[in-house]
Image (tube, coloured by chain):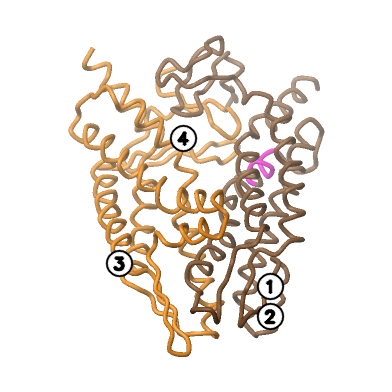
Amino acid sequence: MTQVTAASKDLAACHVCCKLASSELHHCPRCGAAMHLRKRDSIQRTLALLVTACLLYIPANLYPIMITDQLGQSEGSTILGGVILLIHHGAVPVALVIFLFSVMVPIGKLLSMFYLVWTVKRHSRVTPRQRTVMYQITEFVGKWSMVDVFVVAILVALVHLGGILGIRPGIAALSFAGVVIVTMIAAESFDPRLIWDEMEEQDRGS
Amino acid sequence: MNGDIACHGCDLLVNVAELKEGESASCPRCGHFLTRRRPNAYSKVLAYSVASLILLVLANSFSFLSFGASGLESVITLRETPMAVWKYGMPEVAIMVAAFIIVIPAMILVLLLILCIPLERGRYRPWLIPVAKGIFLTQNWSMVEVFIIGVIVSLVKIAAMATVVLGISFWAYAGFSICFTLAVASLDRYQCWERIEQLGAARA
């Protein structure tokens, strides 16, 4: 089977409605969304957003994500501090869930997006198909890191008993939510078709 | 070019004109999902949307969780979760939480209803295109299933400190998250837009 891409026939696909139309058009003839052969400045935008996410990730880990006020004493806990505390309390499964969603997923997402951006213009031993799967996983897990922000919101609302016990949100909640949202937009800005464009150019060259 | 679809993962042109009802297509090159022709797709979307809309109203009408220790008790509703964050000086986080768990899902549900009723009855309506655009551009930003996991994690975290009771709203929200996910998943992007185009062409 010969493999023909839409781009080689000068067709652009609308990212909102899947319509195929001449790549010379600026707007989709069916739904009116802006149309491009490839997402515009995909690599630059993705990189800029990834750097933003990395910067936001620093305060997200250094500052407390929530502050517990108990009998007049305030104690802040960071994301990692919370995980360690849970392990000390013997709640290992919850600690693992929080570690997975708040530490592994955001870091893994940043690393895999950097890797994809890095390899897009270079030859890689990882096949384009494997890299596409990697991209799809990154895109899918994106919003799951929000779990920790929701946990903070629920605990803040729920846990307050007169002056005895209360929980306040810490500044890290804001920066961590920022990390999640910015990496989600970064994944959306990346165009996986660029991985395949590179491979086709190499095929044509050889 | 009729029946061609360009893979969103790798731009390969794939012809899906011969796809039969109940079948789905994936890209032969990169494996990306392309489209599925579900039998009675729009009535399924409508059924799930109506169910989740009712459950969302229920989830907003009763107590969500209650927390008690040493004779004191605190009860919250679903709405109070973002409102409490606002009260503690983080309006940005509060707006995000409210948007991801209530506002965006509710908006998508209303849009699904006004999109799928005409599609099911085979009528063209001038709002079909903007409504469908609204759904497909916002559907990634609903986090109802993530919120359910968040509630469960919170419960386990504080279960040792106090007694926590799940309210009616929690169960309604859990049901809502299932129905909502099914409603969104039952609407196929490619098939839906082809249908809108067909109806538009038939009317002209």
**Which residue is the extreme one toward the top?**
A24
Task: Measure the C-alpha gap from mark 2 to mark 3.
Answer: 34 Å
Q: Chain of mark 4?
A: B
Spot occupied by residue A33 in the image (x, y as percentages of width and height): 47, 22
Task: Measure the C-alpha gap from mark 1 to mark 3.
Answer: 32 Å
Per the rendering, the mark at residue B137 is: 4
Count the numbered circles shown: 4
Q: Mark 2 — residue?
A: A87
Q: Is residue B181 magenta?
A: no
Q: Are marks 2 and 1 in contact (CB under 8 Å)?
A: yes
Image quarter of residue B134: top left
Labels 2 and 1 positioned on one and the same chain: yes
What residue is drawn where x is 51% and y is 65%? B150
Q: Is residue A52 left or right of residue A145?
A: right
Q: Which residues are magenta?
A: A128-133
Labels 3 and 4 positioned on one and the same chain: yes
- The chain painted orange is B
Per the rendering, the mark at residue B62 is: 3
- Front residue of B101 and A190: B101
Q: Are there few (<14), some (14-19), or many (20+) residues within 10 Å of tag 3? A: some
Q: Chain of mark 3?
A: B
Which amino acid is tagged 1? Answer: Val
Labels 2 and 4 positioned on one and the same chain: no
What residue is drawn where x is 34% and y is 32%? B192
Q: Chain of mark 1?
A: A
Shown colour of chain A: brown
Which amino acid is tagged 4? Answer: Leu
Q: Are there few (<14), some (14-19), or many (20+) residues within 10 Å of tag 4? A: few
